[in-house]
Amino acid sequence: MSVEHVSELSQQLVLVTGGARGLGACLVRAFARQGAKVVINYLKSEAAAQALADEFPQQCLAVQADVTDATAVQALFAKAQAHFGQPITTVVNNALPEFSFNGDARPHADTLTWSQLNQQLEGIVGGALNTTQAALPSMKQAGFGRIINIGTNLFQNPVVPYHDYTAAKAALLSMTRTLSHDLGPDQITVNMISGGLLRTTDASAATPEAVFDLIAASTPLRRVTTPEEFADAALFFAGPWARAVTGQNLVVDGGLVKNG
């Protein structure tokens, strides 16, 4: 099968980590609607993951795995290949370790601990490392691979003191760029998509309406980005249109943050 054929979304087997709820579920639906086969990874949300898989019974498979456990991730990849008869060649690293998006409750400079930072680093960067390493043999054999990391615009616009979360996402951006250089000769692209407040996901459900209004007024589009709009950018990076794009961070937030 040619690389051009493999790059078509309808021919891909896509892994979405943390895919059962919120943005992850929107990412799963976006790929499935384009004809891709999708592995819905979850940690605790078994019912939600299975319900989502049932929406696309021929295309989706729900698989439980803790992405910080390299052995569990390897088992997930093996199960997916056995089920679909093809390897995972597109990985969307969306999983997030337990975190409260509540600015008032987050630690400030005088109370932040290494344990809090390390928890986010292990989940965000460690999880992405595990899925990338599990995917590499099949990607290299196919001469094709797509790794898409989910970031945050708080890296450029740190308006909320999410020190631990933002530091981990910044580290993931750095790894996105170094991996793109390392894996480019194997025709594996590595990119990041960064968003801000989305209307509406599980993470933003408790956000006051006044905050949504403030964000909307601050964007050129005068509205808050939806998770469905954010997910569309993943289709771009995974598909043939982005075959010459790697090592990039695309901010999808309605123009609130100008990336440079």
Image (cartoon, rainbow, N blue to C red):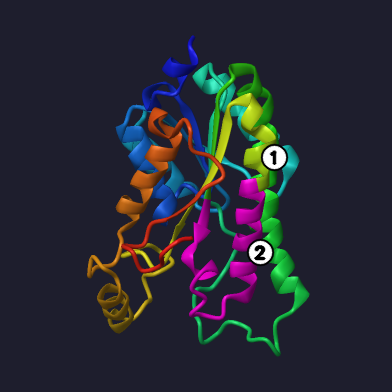
For the magenta stretch, what is the residue range? Answer: 150-177
- Residue 120 screen position, x and y as percent: 66, 64
- Residue 230 screen position, x and y as percent: 36, 53
Q: Secondary structure at mark 1?
A: helix
**137 displayed left or right of 93:** right
**50 displayed left or right of 146:** left
Up the image or down, 198 lies above or below 108; here it is above
Query: Most extreme residue toward the bottom, as rendered?
Result: 110
User: Which residue carries the number 1 mark?
Assistant: 72
**238 displayed left or right of 124:** left
- Number of numbered discs overlaid on the protein picture: 2
**Which of pointers 2 and 1 lies earlier in the amino acid sequence?**
1
Instruction: Using a 10 Å C-alpha cutoff, classify the residue at mark 2 as few (fewer than 14 neighbours), some (14 to 19) or many (20 or more).
Output: many
* 172 falls in the magenta region: yes
Up the image or down, 53 lies above or below 94; here it is above
Up the image or down, 218 lies above or below 62; here it is below
Where residue 55 sits, quadrant-wise, is top left
Instruction: Using a 10 Å C-alpha cutoff, classify the residue at mark 1 as few (fewer than 14 neighbours), some (14 to 19) or many (20 or more).
Output: some
Q: Amino acid at mark 1?
A: Ala
Q: Which mark is residue 120?
A: 2
Q: Amino acid at mark 2?
A: Gln
Q: Which residue is nearer to you in this view: 220 or 165?
A: 220
Name the residue located 64 percent from the left edge and 71 percent from the top edge.
Answer: 164
Is any atom of residue 210 visible in this view? yes
- Residue 204 screen position, x and y as percent: 39, 69
Query: Most extreme residue toward the top, as rendered?
Result: 1
- Residue 223 screen position, x and y as percent: 24, 68
Where residue 217 sits, quadrant-wise, is bottom left
Q: Secondary structure at mark 2?
A: helix
Report how far apart the C-alphas of labels 2 and 1 lie in the structure.
19 Å
Q: Which mark is residue 212?
A: none
